Image: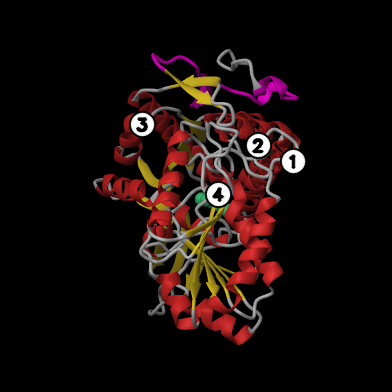
């Protein structure tokens, strides 16, 4: 087992160290050697916990070649066979869930309870798409001529490249890989450099499940080195990316030369609307769940809490009281609800957004500074009277800051909610079903949670509109982005 590059630290506490890998997987071979290595650190302590290869561009080419070589046999397998292997991968994720969660917390920082939830969420995509593989139906279309028969086949698009983020080191991989492999595609994955260990552990389990060599490859290294190969190599027929809108735009440009199919799950600026007739206890609870998941570092996290001015004071009192109970600490420790941010730059960015809102006249009711634990920790912060011109309103915060903006009337609530280039997730709380229906219809978002913050599930289509992205992940729609339609017109059928 190649784990020589794991250093003393939290990874010593794994129950079964054999899931830990510090080498890349290319064509079924573990590649440990590279001229340079990447340090992986624990965001809670800043200590380096492992090193993984900083691979050169040529390694990405090799991985793409391996994925291409594996493609004909993989796509030719009966769907039921692919489903069986995905099921075995899912089962192994369940068996090793505790260790996967521990690895995830060690490199990403989120509390262990959240890491366990993410591992279950991640595994659910492998299970779901394994089942969906058997339902990759085509179509039969009534032909315009008596001697013709028209059928539509859904075929795997081919070799796929995936670039995944650090905020969900497991689920953003399986949401893509599950769909790709189920459809009969092969994949080259480049995980975020901050969180490669979860990806490599998933690859280890995939291999144990029996995925053939080259079907799922993982390369670690810098985006600058590996990215251009993944976006420029003509053998890659599809790029799937989760990350910022800024990077997504650049990847789209790079993919244009070889006209690749793309799926982009990009930034968000989720409004959380509290109408005057909402149950304020439920709304405060929902806002906490949606705002502080992963310390506020998710694309679907509430970014702006829009509250009817009539209930502003009681709502803010409830929210503030609930926030005071949130325990900040190392994610490995019992009771931690909010872990560290991913790095120092993230802490600085949150500080700048809060500082600029304060200078603009917003009121900081709680928090508003780095946490006394130091390092990458930031205090859960409540800011009220945030106005639409502030960067705290316009930008994705990606930190534990609840920014509250009052509104008067439904039209103003909707105008504020929709006044953004983003269109990923949105939430609305109220009790009049007719009014809520009108909100759902007028919110310019790919996803709307009505009286619930819990919108993420493998059975529903996850994705955004406007500059939040292209395509949908999860659900039966999630396979569409990994297939091409082939229309067959059979002529000369005796009439
Ligand atoms: C994300 O933040 O990109 C994903 C969050 C989720 O799947 O719930």
**Callout count:** 4
Residue visible at 68% across and 32% down?
A: 102
Mark toward the start of the polypeptide (4 vs 2): 2
**Is residue 303 on the magenta stretch?**
no
Residue on which disc 2 sits: 329
Instruction: Residue 113: name its quadrant.
Output: top right
Compared across the picture, whether 226 is left or right of 315 comes to: left
Residue linked to disc 1: 335
Asked if the beta carbon under badge 3 is closer than 8 A to the nearest atom of ligand 1, the reply is no
Are the residues flagged by discs 2 and 1 in contact, CB closer than 8 Å? yes
Packing grade of label 4 (10 A; few <14, some 14-19, many >=20) is: many
Mark 2 and mark 1 lie on one chain; the one further toward the N terminus is 2
Which residue bears the numbered disc 3? 226
Q: Residues within 10 Å of mark 3 (few under 14, many from 20)?
A: many
- SS of the residue at dot 2? loop
- Residue visible at 35% across and 46% down? 247
Render colour scheme: secondary structure
In the image, 340 versus 442, the foreground residue is 340
Q: Which residues are magenta?
A: 10-36
- Per the image, label 3 sits on a secondary structure element best described as helix
Mark 3 to mark 4 CA distance (whole Å): 32 Å
Cα–Cα gap, marks 3 and 2:
34 Å
Question: At 47% from the left edge and 36% from the top edge, which residue is drawn?
Answer: 189
Report if the beta carbon of the residue with label 4 is closer than 8 angstroms to ligand 1. no
Pinpoint residue 138: horizontal percent, then vertical percent: 51, 63
């Amino acid at each position: 087992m190649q784990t020589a590059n794991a250093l003393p630290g939290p990874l010593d506490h794994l129950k079964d160290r054999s899931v830990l890998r510090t080498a890349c997987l290319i064509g079924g071979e573990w590649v440990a050697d590279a001229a340079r290595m990447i340090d992986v650190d624990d965001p809670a302590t800043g200590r380096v916990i492992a090193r993984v290869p900083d691979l050169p561009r040529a390694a990405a080419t090799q991985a793409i070649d391996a994925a291409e070589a594996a493609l004909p046999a993989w796509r030719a397998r009966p769907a039921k066979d692919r489903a069986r292997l995905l099921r075995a991968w899912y089962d192994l994720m369940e068996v090793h869930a505790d260790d996967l969660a521990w690895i995830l917390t060690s490199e990403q920082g989120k509390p262990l309870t959240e890491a366990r939830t993410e591992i279950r969420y991640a595994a659910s995509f492998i299970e779901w798409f394994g089942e969906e593989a058997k339902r990759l139906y085509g179509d039969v279309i009534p032909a315009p001529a008596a001697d013709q028969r028209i059928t539509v086949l859904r075929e795997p698009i081919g070799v796929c490249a995936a670039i995944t983020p650090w905020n969900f080191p497991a689920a953003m991989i399986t949401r893509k890989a599950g769909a790709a492999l189920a459809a009969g595609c092969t994949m080259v994955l480049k995980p975020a450099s901050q969180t490669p260990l979860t990806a490599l552990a998933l690859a280890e389990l995939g291999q144990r499940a029996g995925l053939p060599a080259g079907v799922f490859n993982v390369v670690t290294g810098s985006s600058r080195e590996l990215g251009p190969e993944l976006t420029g190599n003509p053998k890659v027929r599809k790029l799937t990316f989760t990350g910022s809108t800024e990077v997504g735009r650049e990847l789209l440009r790079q993919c244009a030369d070889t006209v690749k199919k793309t799926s982009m799950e990009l930034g968000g600026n989720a409004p959380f609307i509290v109408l005057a007739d909402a149950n304020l206890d439920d709304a405060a609870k929902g806002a906490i769940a949606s705002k502080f998941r992963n310390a506020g570092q998710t694309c679907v996290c509430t970014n702006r809490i829009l509250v009817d001015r009539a209930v502003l004071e009681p709502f803010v009192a409830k929210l503030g009281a609930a926030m005071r109970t949130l325990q900040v600490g190392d994610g490995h420790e019992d009771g931690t609800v909010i872990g560290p941010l991913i790095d120092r730059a993230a802490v600085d960015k949150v500080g700048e957004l809060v500082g600029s809102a304060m200078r603009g006249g917003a009121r900081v009711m709680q928090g508003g500074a780095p946490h006394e634990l130091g390092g990458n920790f930031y205090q859960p912060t409540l800011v009220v009277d945030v106005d639409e011109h502030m960067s705290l309103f316009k930008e994705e915060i990606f930190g534990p800051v609840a920014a509250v903006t009052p509104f008067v009337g439904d039209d103003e609530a909707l105008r504020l909610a929709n006044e953004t280039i983003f269109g990923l997730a949105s939430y609305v709380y109220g009790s009049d079903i007719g009014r809520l229906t009108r909100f759902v219809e007028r919110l310019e978002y790919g996803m709307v949670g009505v009286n619930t913050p819990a919108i993420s599930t493998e059975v529903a289509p996850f994705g955004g509109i406007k500059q939040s992205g292209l395509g949908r992940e999860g659900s039966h729609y999630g396979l569409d982005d990994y297939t091409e339609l082939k229309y067959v017109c059979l002529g000369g059928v005796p009439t």
